[in-house]
């Protein structure tokens, strides 16, 4: 196995610029690794046949003393809903199996202009609407830590690719947990930026989702998250709500100077025993390091109201924008959804929402966001679970809106298990770095939550945490045998 495939993107970029290795060597190492492991993982669903020619061009440009940018010659993958010029983009939708976009969406264009080579596209569930990754076009993606478990979703193909060394950098997006759950399940890093710090770069529906959606990277280091954010943040012609960001870097402080709040439950939503143990160990280690650490949740923040508001806003902004069918489903879903609790009730109510109801939902959201900011004010970051437990075994994706998952010996509504912890910060728009805190057995990640618009400060904190705890760990299979010998159960 070529060790180049496990270098982080910023080190690959530096090595190419320094001529330690060539862009062609980097690309060929990744293509060989993909050929060996992608058939088992099913993480990358479309490869760019022109990538090798682009790598050769990158080396030629560098030989002449020129450089395309900070990612010169570095291969990058994209979730298969970002339109890429000349490269199939399906949205995991059977009717778009052969769709070849005529141009890049702006964020793809930005990374290309920074020197990145589009390596390929990664798998996602249909419409990105699940936290497992089972595509009606390409099939199921498996977790590189345990092939019988899900890598998460909806950026599941991307997280599996990053964890397994198939790609050094992935661009995905997140409205409920789609960057955070996959990073948590696969033992890698993700950044959900502050809402409207990065433009919503989906050309097919740039204004359908105005709130809560965030585009961000998955990588194997915090430094790569920071690099990618610097390239994608800021306004676009069609996203005037995105503010220009001054390039001011925060001062990196010693870890002992940071103040951390932490928790292992939101209201009635709690975690399993191994996740609780991992969080308690992290809090104890930080305390012994000299940090101010307190187990706390906001006293006046109504999590039940927040979950319902999140559910309402998810479905109402789509239904009111352009989908009468979704509004009609509000008359069909209640008998199936209501047992699922406040988030499910919000999904149903939002699908049948009026304009007045939509405005009332936004007003509640503003109040909850203000309460969250008040709570975070004395703290540098809040450490929270991503989900109640680590990656679970593959489940049938039929009728998932009526399904449940286990938390130790208790059952929890499927969507609440997957999005209960993460959805709060989608609703409030706070930036979140997800990073691994336990990688023996199955990975366990933590949400490191910052104040709105303090993304760079949050990344500095995440870097200090990573330096303290240790960085990315390869999946067990790579550490032991440099390959996969596990039996894979057939898809359900």
Image (cartoon, helix red, strand yellow):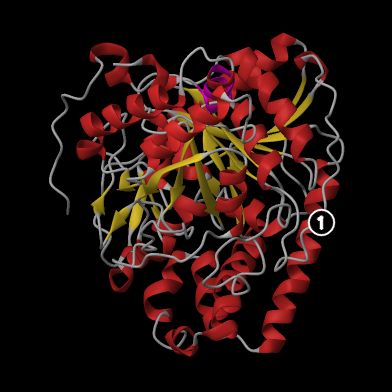
Q: Is residue 264 left or right of residue 373?
A: left
Badge 1 crowding class, 10 Å Cα cut-off, few under 14, some 14 to 19, many 20 or more, is some
| Rendered-image quadrant of the N terminus | top left
| Rendered-image quadrant of the C terminus | bottom left
The spot of residue 82 in percent (x, y) is 49, 57
Q: Is residue 404 left or right of residue 389?
A: left
Q: Magenta stretch containing residue 12, yes or no?
A: yes
* Residue at 39% in and 29% down: 27
Q: Nearer the viewer, residue 97 or 333?
A: 97
* Residue at 62% in and 61% down: 200
Q: Is residue 62 left or right of residue 388?
A: right
Q: Nearer the viewer, residue 441 or 336?
A: 441
Inspect this view and state whether residue 407 appears.
Answer: no
**Which of the 4 image quadrants contains residue 305?**
bottom right
For disc 1, the marked residue is 243
Q: Magenta stretch containing residue 203, yes or no?
A: no
**Which of the 4 image quadrants contains residue 40?**
top left
The spot of residue 366 in percent (x, y) is 79, 65
Residue furthest front as drawn: 64
Position of residue 176 relative to residue 54, above or below, is below
The spot of residue 188 in percent (x, y) is 48, 31
Inspect this view and state whether residue 369 appears.
Answer: yes
* Residue at 41% in and 18% down: 4
**Which of the 4 image quadrants contains residue 250?**
top right
Question: What secondary structure characterizes most of the magenta part?
Answer: helix
Q: Which residues are magenta?
A: 8-15
Q: Nearer the viewer, residue 168 or 180?
A: 168
Q: Is residue 457 left or right of residue 162?
A: right
Position of residue 428 relative to residue 19, above or below, is below
């Amino acid at each position: 196995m070529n060790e180049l495939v496990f270098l982080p993107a910023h080190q690959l970029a530096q090595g190419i610029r320094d001529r330690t290795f060539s862009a062609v060597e980097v690309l060929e190492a990744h293509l060989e690794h993909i050929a060996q492991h992608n058939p088992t993982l099913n993480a990358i669903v479309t490869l760019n046949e022109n990538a090798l020619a682009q790598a050769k061009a990158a080396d030629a440009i560098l030989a002449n003393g020129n450089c395309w940018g900070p990612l010169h010659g570095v291969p990058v993958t994209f979730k298969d809903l970002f339109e890429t010029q000349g490269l199939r983009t399906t949205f995991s939708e059977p009717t778009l199996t052969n769709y070849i976009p005529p141009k890049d969406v702006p964020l793809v264009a930005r990374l290309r202009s920074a020197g990145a080579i589009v390596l390929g596209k990664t798998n996602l569930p249909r419409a990105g609407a699940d936290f497992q990754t089972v595509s009606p076009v390409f099939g199921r993606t498996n977790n590189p830590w345990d092939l019988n478990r899900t890598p998460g979703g909806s950026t599941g193909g991307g997280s599996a690719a990053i964890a397994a060394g198939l790609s050094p950098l992935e661009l995905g997006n997140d409205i409920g947990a789609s960057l955070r759950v996959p990073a948590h399940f696969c033992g890698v890093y993700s950044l959900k930026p502050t809402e409207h710090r990065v433009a919503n770069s989906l050309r097919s529906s740039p204004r359908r989702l105005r709130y809560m959606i965030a585009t961000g990277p998955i990588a194997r280091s915090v430094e790569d998250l920071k690099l990618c954010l610097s390239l994608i943040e800021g306004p676009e012609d069609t996203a005037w709500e995105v503010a220009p960001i001054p390039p001011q870097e925060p001062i990196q402080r010693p870890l002992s100077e940071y103040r951390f709040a932490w928790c292992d439950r939101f209201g009635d939503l709690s975690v399993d025993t191994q996740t609780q143990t991992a969080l308690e160990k992290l809090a104890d280690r930080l305390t012994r390091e000299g940090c101010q650490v307190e187990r706390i949740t906001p006293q006046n923040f109504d999590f039940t109201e927040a979950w319902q508001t999140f559910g309402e806003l998810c479905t109402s902004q789509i239904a009111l924008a352009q989908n009468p069918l979704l509004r009609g489903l509000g008359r069909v879903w209640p008998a199936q959804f209501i047992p699922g609790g406040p988030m499910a009730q919000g999904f149903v109510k939002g699908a049948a929402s009026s304009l007045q109801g939509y405005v009332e939902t936004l007003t509640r959201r503003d109040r909850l966001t203000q309460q969250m900011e008040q709570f975070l004010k004395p703290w540098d970051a809040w450490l929270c679970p991503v989900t109640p437990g680590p990656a679970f075994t593959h489940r049938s994706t039929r009728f998932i809106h009526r399904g449940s998952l286990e938390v130790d010996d208790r059952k929890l509504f499927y969507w609440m298990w997957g999005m209960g912890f993460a959805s709060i910060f989608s609703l409030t728009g706070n930036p979140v770095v997800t990073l691994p805190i336990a990688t023996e057995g199955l990975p366990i990640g933590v949400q490191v939550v910052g104040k709105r618009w303090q993304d760079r400060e949050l990344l500095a904190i995440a870097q200090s945490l990573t330096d303290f705890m240790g960085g990315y760990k390869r999946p067990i299979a790579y550490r032991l045998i440099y390959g996969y010998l596990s039996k894979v159960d057939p898809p359900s």
